Amino acid sequence: MAQPMFVLVQFNVKDFPQYFEHYGSLMSKVVARFGGQFLAASRDVVAKEGESSGNFTAIIRFPSKEAAIEMYESPEYAPLKAKRIHELTEGGNLVFIPGLETAQVG
């Protein structure tokens, strides 16, 4: 069984209505095309230790590292990524985290 890949994002969103209209509302379809799904997405995170590095956080699960990279480097995502980076946010983090491999039963 392939090892899943999680993508953790924490962005400093400039204007939430603009962000969701031009990026957030379009991402579910792009992520799903590569077998991914959003597990969490919120402005309301609680940092129990340290500090959150943005005002919006999301966690996305992909079935494999390859699927996550393929989505990130895809032509479908390129214009959304450019708009996010250059217009909709003031930086942030996007981190790929390998998931724990699950043993196959059988």
Image (tube, rainbow, N blue to C red):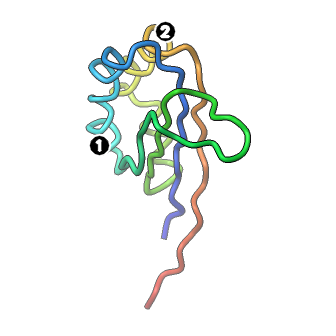
- In the displayed image of the protein, which residue is found farthest to the right? 50
Q: Secondary structure at mark 2?
A: helix
Q: Are marks 1 and 2 in contact (CB under 8 Å)?
A: no
Query: Residue shown at 47%/37% (left/top)?
Result: 44
Up-down relation of residue 54 to residue 60 (above or below): above
Instruction: Categorize mark 2 by other alpha carbons within 10 Å: few (<14), some (14-19), many (20+).
Output: few
Q: Would you name the residue on which mark 2 appears?
A: 86
Label for residue 98? none
Q: Residue furthest bottom?
A: 106
The percent position of residue 20, horizontal first and vertical second, equals: 31, 24
Amino acid, disc 2: His
Amino acid bearing label 1: Arg
Q: Position of residue 55 (x, y in %)?
A: 52, 27
- At a point 55% along the width and 32% down the height, the residue shown is 10
Say which of 53 and 98 sits in front: 53
Residue drawn where x is 45% and y is 39% of the image: 70
Taking the spot 27% from the left edge, 29% from the top edge, the residue there is 25
Quarter assignment of residue 100: bottom right
Q: Is residue 73 above or below residue 62?
A: above
Q: Quadrant of residue 33?
A: top left
Secondary structure under the numbered disc 1 in the rendered image: helix
Residue receiving disc 1: 33
Pointer 1 or 2: first along the chain: 1
Q: Position of residue 38 (x, y in %)?
A: 38, 47
Q: At which x and y percent is residue 63?
A: 43, 57
Instruction: Choose mark 1 or mark 2, whichever is in front.
Output: 2
Rounded to the nearest angstrom, the CA distance separating label 1 from label 2 is 24 Å
Nearest to the observer: residue 54 or residue 92: 54
Q: Is residue 5 left or right of residue 26?
A: right
